[in-house]
Image (cartoon, helix red, strand yellow):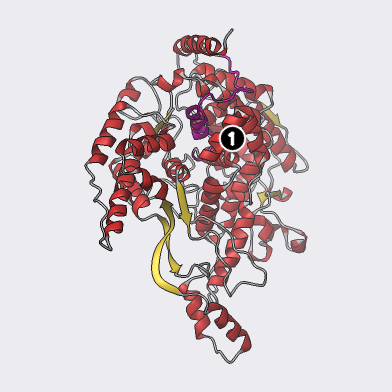
Amino acid sequence: MHSWWKRHLKVWICGLAIASLSGCVADGSGAKPESRAEAWRFLTQATFGADEVNIDRVMTMGYEAWIDEQFSLHPAFTYRDFFTRRDAEIKADHPGDASARAGADQTLEAFFTRALTDKAQLRARLAFALSEIMVISCNDDILGTVAPQIAAGYMDTLDSALDGSYRDLLEAVAKSPAMGQYLTYRGNTKEVPSVGHFPDENFAREIMQLFSIGLNELNSDGSKKLDGNGNPIETYTSDDVKGLAKVFTGWGNYRGAAYSSASDSACFFWAKECQDPEGFYQPMVPYPAYHSVSEKKFLGVTIPAQDTPSPQADLTTALNRLATHPNTAPFISKQLIQRLVTSNPTPDYVARVAERFTATGGNLKEVVKAILLDDEARGPITLVAPEHGKLREPVLRLTALLRAFKFNTITAGLSASPMDGANTTRLDYVAIGNTSDPATSWGQAPLYAPSVFNYFRPGYAPPQGEAASKGMVVPEMQLVNESSVTGYVNAVLDLLTNGIGPSVVVDTDGQCGAYTLEVQQYIQSLDPKVPANKALQDAAAKCKLETLTQRSVTMQLIEQRAMAYDASTLTQHIADRLLGGSMTDKLRQAMISTLSTLDVPALSSQPSSGDAVNSALDKRVWTAILMVAVSPEFLVTK
């Protein structure tokens, strides 16, 4: 049968399947996109934004080969290495300031550097998705201020876990010092009923409710099981929480050989005399003396009372139960589908992914393949199905805009500061900062969720509107309000006209922009009679830092400026970059009409004429991008 007929027969059959909720078998393995639009759609789901390089690669390699390559591409740096190097640079840039050190902003720098520049896009996107399911937040004082490197280490934990199973991920998260801090079970002690002390139940509750089995018993397709009265069946009780909480006792921060002489008590409670820096990154370790030895009952499992504490054995039993619980495959599969493809997957889509989850023992790579290669992700019918798709969350809007076009970052490709050690190479990084303020910024920032429930819940349904009337969920709508809508428009406009990120002192000759005006002033204040100081001053003299400042990240739209003479040409180009080439006639006509009202003056012999022309062309480009960025066609991905 001719390939065209095969494809369109399959489209017709799958359309009937989706309409009837009977499902359609996925066969994405070996398939290649037939157009750049199809490659763009795939990359919108699998990366932080489609770019021309990856579009070409997906079209050449095919979907599955691209996924395989992405899983083999480990990131260019770990969060830990990034944080450590930025810490050294910040200290070098603030000589004599004992308080100067890396903070939560540097974890954000690492995140955006990966999201915007790293080749391992799928891994970075998946780690972000997992961070929204297994939430920690830098709003916590320890994670955000006192020991922010713990949060950096958590992102490495999520990335490393992608090479294993969901069961491996659960254990890595359960032992994470970041999660132990955020959900308050680091230093959790066994029960002492005589004084009314019982183990902290926070993590025991959340690992069931949010990280594995959810609140209600599920069928394999993610639908709720009902009792004889038609009511949902709860998956666990307060007794299950109490029993499981005993498992998460006796776990404290790592300590190495250098701290072997410190008491267990000092190390378990992270007293000053036993604060091993490795404890910020290494998995937590058991302290048996603080682990409960009483009987532990949860989810149909009983761990008998013990004469000798067995924290690791108890943890293994608990995590095995959670990972193999019938709910876990559909519960987690649906959430990953929601994060990558669509907020309201059909039951058959969930069932197909859950089946792969179960068959492979929760192998994350295979689960991701099942999600991204399924017909509901790749098929053309879902492009027009109103129930399909998802609202693009603010972080992904920002990264998509930057990856679609060229941008410049002052903090990349810079020379070393004279204050650096010999043979020092500075990091290339993207400084964007905390974008969580909905009124003045994008309304969301990685690792800054307001609670363990993330910025939005997977089951959130707007109280009014068509989605609510159809029983659909729109998780990302939980972020939407009057302030965030206005704030988003202003944030896009600010990005286009001024850039984003902290203001940076500009080196006018472009040779020494890696260090600040403060550093140069410090060097100039040193006694020039001291040879070492004289050498520093000679090095600094090559730089001409001025108090001219600009945002650290600015969009470079020279290519688009050249197209802006013709409104139709510019409109199609912006559609190609931000919408995969397709655009409704209504939006297209509105853009062409609006752009045509922005006059471009004729070039004359006047010295300022060129600047006036470029300014007018830039306004056309900014207007075109802004109109698409605020359109439903960009905000909703299919």
> Considering the image in quadrants, where does the C terminus appear?
top left
The image quadrant of residue 235 is: top right
- In the image, residue 582 sits, relative to residue 431, either above or below, namely above
Residue 373 coordinates in the image, percent (x, y): 57, 24
Question: Closer to the camera, 332 or 241?
Answer: 332
Amino acid of disc 1: Arg
Question: Closer to the camera, 53 or 609?
Answer: 609
For disc 1, the marked residue is: 57
Q: Residue furthest top?
A: 1
Q: Residue furthest bottom?
A: 529
The residue sitting at 69% across, 31% down in the picture is: 320
Question: Does residue 188 appear anywhere in the picture?
Answer: no
The residue sitting at 46% across, 75% down in the picture is: 544
Question: Closer to the camera, 347 or 558?
Answer: 558
Q: Is residue 38 magenta?
A: yes
Residue 461 coordinates in the image, percent (x, y): 38, 29
Relative placement, left or right, of 546 versus 511 is left
Residue 516 coordinates in the image, percent (x, y): 48, 71
Query: Helix, strand, or loop for circle 1?
Result: helix
Relative placement, left or right, of 505 versus 414 is left
Q: Is residue 154 magenta?
A: no
Residue 92 coordinates in the image, percent (x, y): 57, 71
> Considering the image in quadrants, where does the N terminus appear?
top right
Relative placement, left or right, of 600 versus 220 is left
Where are the magenta residues, as a range?
25-49
The residue sitting at 61% across, 42% down in the picture is: 120
Question: Does residue 89 appear anywhere in the picture?
Answer: yes
The residue sitting at 39% across, 23% down in the picture is: 472
